Amino acid sequence: RASDFDEVNLGYSEDDALAEAARCLQCRNATCIEGCPVQIDIKSFIARITAGDHRGGVEVIKQRNALPSVCGRVCPQETQCEAACVLAKKGQPVAIGWLERFLGDRDIACDLEHRCLPEVGEDSGFRCAVVGSGPAGLACAGELRRLGHGVTVFESLHAPGGVLSYGIPEFRLPARIVAAEVGMLEAAGVEIRCDSVVGATYTLDDLRAEGFDAVFYGVGAGLPVFLGVPGENLNGVYSANEFLTRVNLMRAHEFPHSDTPVWRGRRVVVVGGGNVAMDAARTALRLGAEEVVLAYRRTEAEMPARVEEVEHAKQEGVRFELLCSPVEVRGHDGWVTGFVAQRMELGEPDESGRRAPVCVLGSDFEIECDTVIPAVGTRAHPLLKAAAPGVELTARGYVAADEDGATSLPGVYAGGDIVTGAATVILAMGAGKKAARAMDDRLRSPDSAVESGDVR
Ligand code: FAD
Ligand code: SF4
């Protein structure tokens, strides 16, 4: 399977889903719901599966989450709802994520007219602009529509979905699934304008002039962080973001049938231990690499990637080089020839609660390679200042927003990675939804006077 981009996890058949749903105890105190960041009524949707009422199950999920097929595939359920399931204490929790995916996929398989479309409230007369079509923007747009507002989403790339489209690979989250779930929002009346960079194609003033009454920024934090070691400018060094975007969004693996090429490394080192690192390593394998080494500075126990992704990467042949930290990228004639790292050992826990890696002096070693892919994090893009002029930023360049997503500019809200820093799909969706409710309150409030500098 490591030689094609077909989806790896094939999901449940009807019999599998029924058998798994039958394991649910239908607890009086359903702790799983508390473990879900958007409080889906998990117990009820599982009961609908047992009763054979798939449509009813999807309706239960969609009251809280417009993207069940996406979240069923990529949410870290093992640290959220499934960790809180009472059966987790006895061994194996109910596979809530896979059941959610089962229902979402059933819905997508229907014709559009038979799908469970998001609810649309009575027309409020207000119009809202959403900047960015990642999980935060999509969740905000869906909720604003449910509350009866007109919504236009502005997306700088040529396809909607944010990281769901440009970051997470096809073998984990097929593009057709993202397109189908985004399509349902469009069918509910959300307008999406792609190729529209707010801060360049449109300014905030243009949005005001177009008559938008409130604005939500869900622009993500997609600026890659590099290693900061000598040799990083050599040919053959790709940020994981660029590498994954070329393949996922621009379909570089199909070049020359697509317009965008990608350098196909023979021996590849990926640096990092999160989902992004696993995705880059598994993508490099699928592009034909003979060897892919994943270099991570702590041990497997501290890896932030989902357990399923770590297992799949190992099964497919990614070699893990643990407890090592980058020192230098070596090259010849401008091209990468090796990756030098230093051995680490674990010391005392740091502020993240994980044991901090400490370098072992004189332990440098070299891995021969022609490609190095840093996947060590992302941060806010400095272009944000042009996209959201006048909005207060934090010292680290993220948007300063309160619990409801309100920024320093009245009528302007923000949520997702651009507020929290790189997090998860469901947390971004939760933030988008919460901000939509705060925007609604503000728009409908009789005290919401038109202030100077206000978007309204
Ligand atoms: P994004 O998804 O980054 O979306 C922001 C959107 O805004 C983008 O489409 C961008 O093009 C657009 N934009 C930016 N600036 C402008 C502008 N000026 N004008 C118009 N549009 C603009 N999380 C999980 O829960 N599970 C996973 O398995 C997982 N895997 C991941 C794998 C990868 C490779 C990556 C990169 C991340 C992964 N994450 C995962 C994290 C998760 O995807 C993010 O936390 C989430 O997508 C953040 O959502 P967002 O809407 O805030 O931002
Ligand atoms: Fe079912 Fe587990 Fe939730 Fe109980 S906690 S209702 S067993 S999913």
Image (cartoon, rainbow, N blue to C red):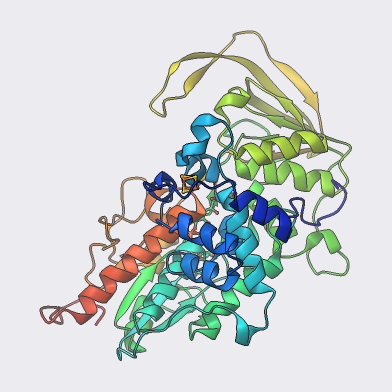
Q: Position of residue 311 (x, y in %)?
A: 71, 35
Residue in front for this viewpoint, 330 or 46: 46
| Relative horizontal placement of residue 190, taking residue 251 as reference (left or right) | left
Q: Position of residue 305 (x, y in %)?
A: 59, 38
Residue in front for this viewpoint, 80 or 141: 80
Establish if 377 lies above or below 365.
below
Q: How many marks?
A: 0
Q: Quadrant of the C terminus?
A: bottom left
| Quarter assignment of residue 389 | bottom left
Q: Is residue 297 visible?
A: no
Residue at 58% over, 23% down: 298
| Quarter assignment of residue 69 | bottom right
Establish if 328 lies above or below 304.
above
Q: Position of residue 260 (x, y in %)?
A: 78, 64
Q: Is residue 244 visible?
A: yes
| Relative horizontal placement of residue 438, taking residue 419 as reference (left or right) | left
Establish if 23 lies above or below 358.
below
Residue at 61% over, 64% down: 103
Task: List the single residue furthest toward the left.
Answer: 447
Q: Position of residue 21 (x, y in %)?
A: 59, 52
